Amino acid sequence: MLAEGDGREAPLRVRVEHRGDRAVVTLDEPDRLNVLSAPMVRQLRRALENLAADTDIRAVVVTGEGPGFSAGGDLKMMRTATEQLSQPEGVADVWRWIRREFGGVARLIAGSDTVFVAALNGPAAGVGLAWALTCDLTIASERAVIVPAFGHLGLIPEVGTSWALTRRLGYQGALAYYLRGEHIDAHAAQRLGLVHEVVDHDQLLAVADDWCSRVASMPAHAVAMTKPLLRAAADASWNDALTLEEFAEPICFTTAAFADSVHAMLTRH
């Protein structure tokens, strides 16, 4: 089975820390650079599902334990996948895993109202990198490294990476990124637009927490509505984006938070 070793009794490889209106999720198998084994992936998906369903949680930080964020897919799992292609299900079992597990985490990050902040503490490769690029904000320690490893393995940009790269680098930039396959340090990644901010390593989680505080300081409905609006606008024409805004804006007018803000501003003047 592709997901060998993934039982409820499997050792915990994902750590979740609740901090009031926010949570920190840590990939926690540092001796393997947080490689995405079956137990880790499914534990992460369950953890994020629970957090996204919790209306008290406004923001989630995703980071890695030890020197790396994530080394990407588990090579042992990949070998198992190549060995079972002659089985009755053939490639369909691999497709299910990629779509339901790897893609499931990406869809949850992109589709929930919760704001996800990726805090890259070290090298990020493969699917781990794809998840980081899917997050609503990606900040990096000065020790972070972007590792585009899929080309050398004979793979394509995966789990939403092609979408993220073409929008941040353009077609030619994305293709050059893929063909070079070179490690990109944190500051170069920021110049390319792959990460939003680079900070001192010791300040990484504190800065991530500051972003969570920015989320918490704003009316819940405003952030929850802005996230899907901006994500939809990335694929919309100017006219369609304007239309989306026109439908969404009147809802904000009906909220107590907006009414209170207007009253406070008028009172000051």
Image (tube, rainbow, N blue to C red):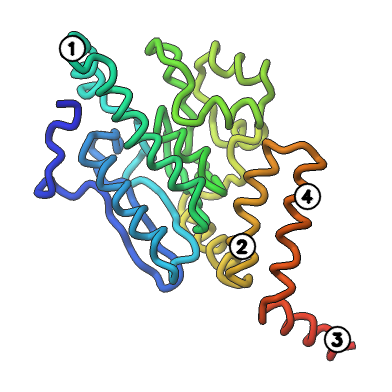
Q: Please identify, in this view, whether the residue under mark 1 or under mark 4 is nearer the observer.
A: 4
Helix, strand or loop at mark 3: helix
Q: Amino acid at mark 3?
A: Leu
CA separation, marks 3 and 2?
Answer: 23 Å
Q: Which one is nearer the viewer's eye here, 177 or 127?
A: 127
Question: Which comes sooner in the sequence, label 3 or label 2?
Answer: 2
Give residue 64's position: percent from left, percent from top.
36, 45
Which residue carries the number 2 mark?
A: 223
Question: Which comes sooner in the sequence, label 3 or label 1?
Answer: 1
Judge from the rendering whether residue 221 lies leftward or rightward of residue 16; answer left or right: right
Which residue carries the number 1 mark?
A: 83
Which residue carries the number 3 mark?
A: 266
Q: Amino acid at mark 4?
A: Thr
Which residue carries the number 4 mark?
A: 243
Question: Which comes sooner in the sequence, label 1 or label 4?
Answer: 1
Question: Which comes sooner in the sequence, label 2 or label 4?
Answer: 2
Above or below: residue 74 compared with residue 12:
above
Question: Which comes sooner in the sequence, label 1 or label 2?
Answer: 1
CA separation, marks 4 and 3?
Answer: 29 Å
Q: Amino acid at mark 1?
A: Glu
Residue drawn where x is 45% and y is 71% of the image: 21
CA separation, marks 2 and 4?
Answer: 19 Å
Give residue 140's position: percent from left, percent from top.
52, 44
- Quadrant of the rendered structure where residue 124 is? top left
Give residue 183's position: percent from left, percent from top.
50, 23
Residue drawn where x is 41% and y is 15% of the image: 155
Above or below: residue 82 compared with residue 200:
above
Kindly check if marks 1 and 4 are in contact, taking CB atoms under 8 A apart as contact. Answer: no
Above or below: residue 21 compared with residue 163:
below
CA separation, marks 1 and 4?
Answer: 50 Å
